Structure formats: C-alpha cells, structure tokens
Amino acid sequence: MQATVLDKQLSFLREIDRLKTVVRQSPLLDNSRKENSAEHSWHLAMYALLLNEYAGGSVNTHRVVQMLLLHDVVEIDAGDFPIHDESSSNSQAEEESEAAKRLFGLLPQQQGNEFLALWREFESAETEDAKFAKALDRFQPLLVNVFTSGGTWKENDVSLEQVFSRYGPVIQRGAPLLWDVCEQWVTQHFSEQASRASGLQKGDKE
C-alpha cells in the first residue's frame, strides 16, 4: 500500500529521534556530561529566538530557527565532526550531503525538497539568514567553552590564535556585535589560563 503524507512525516520524525544518540564534544554548562546533537539544535533555535537583534543583516527569524533545527540532522548518518578534530574526514561534505538526501527524502517530496534547500542554504552561508545561523552555531559552543573553564579547548589543547581563527570569521560575519563580546571573553579566558599556569610554575620552583 502506498505511504500517505502522514506516514512519511511520521517516518521522518521517528528517524530523527536517533539524533539524540549523537554525542558531541561540548559539555553541558554544569559539566555533568556531554551534550547530544538534538540538544544542541534545540538550544541554537532558542538562541535565534532571543538574539535575532544581533544579526549582522536583516533576517527572518523563523527561517533561521528552521535551519538550526535541521542543520545537524545529517549527523544521524555522518556523525559529528568536531571543530577541533584536525583528523576529520576530508569527505565530510560528501557524507553529509548524502545523509541529507536520504533523510529529507523520507518526507513527502515537496516538504523534503524544502528542508533540503534550507539545509543547503545553511551550509553555503551566503544569505543573511544562513550567515546568522552559522554565527550562532559557532557562538554557542564558544560560550560553553568559556563558561566551563575551557571545555573542549582544554581537552584539545586549543590556543588563543586557533579560537580566533576557527570561530572569529564566522561569528563576525553573521553577528558582529556578538563577536565583540566573544573577543572579550576569549581574551580574558586565555589571560586567566596563562596567569594560572604561571602561578603553578612559580609554586613548583619554590
């Protein structure tokens, strides 16, 4: 029997339940465990609702929220590619593109095509909506790292220069005012880390 529109929509909704099992490197702010990709996507959607006034251009918040809810669905098939993992597969873009086709292909054709187009728009990051969505996707983990005393930066021995180069251009392009705040946070964080390390070394010598 041919699947109805509702059958296809429910099939997709059941499939994306698997996103809850994709564990990211970023911890929760209470450091109790690592967050999963579904939690990350939900939190980013909330960031978009609350922080849309800081977008670098005129944005449609509804579309930004849609992109952020959809952007990591591909990790169900492709897995998470942490920003600090330099050994990440060179075929990441191809793997994620194939995942997007499969997953959004579960939906009724028109709806699936719309979601796939939104996902591709996010990946290209050329429109104002996508630039802001991308900025938030960098801003949230940066905030988490700052407020967990280093988080994944400590785990991966990430330097101040690497933070500026990996997060800065994307956040500044889509949300320049948020990047101004980030610069202050990051500079203060690494300054405190350097002071702490200097104090420990001094203590060892004494």
Image (spheres, grey):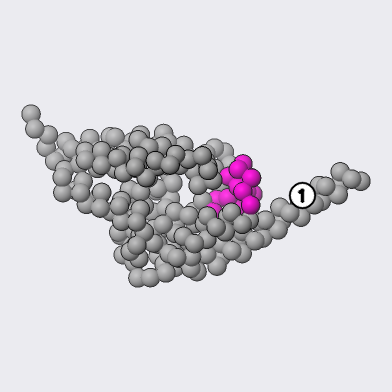
- Does the segment drawn in magenta span residue 154? yes
Q: Amino acid at mark 1?
A: Ala
Magenta stretch bounds: 142-159
Q: Decide if residue 13 is on the left or right side of residue 154.
A: left
Residue in view at x 30 percent, y 60 percent: 62
Location of residue 54 with respect to 204 vertically, above or below: below
Q: Residue 53 appears at what percent x and percent y?
A: 41, 69
Quadrant in the picture for the N terminus = top left
Of residues 179 and 42, the one drawn nearer to the viewer in this rendering = 179
Q: Decide if residue 82 is on the left or right side of residue 66.
A: right
Q: Secondary structure at mark 1?
A: helix
Q: Which residue is mark 1?
A: 197
Location of residue 7 with respect to 199 vertically, above or below: above
Residue in view at x 15 percent, y 45 percent: 109
Of residues 168 and 87, the one drawn nearer to the viewer in this rendering = 87
Q: Residue 143 appears at what percent x and percent y?
A: 54, 54
Q: Quadrant of residue 191?
A: bottom right
Residue 28 visible (yes or no): no
Q: Residue furthest right?
A: 206
Q: Quadrant of residue 130?
A: bottom left
Q: Quadrant of residue 54?
A: bottom left
Q: Residue 98 appears at what percent x and percent y?
A: 29, 40
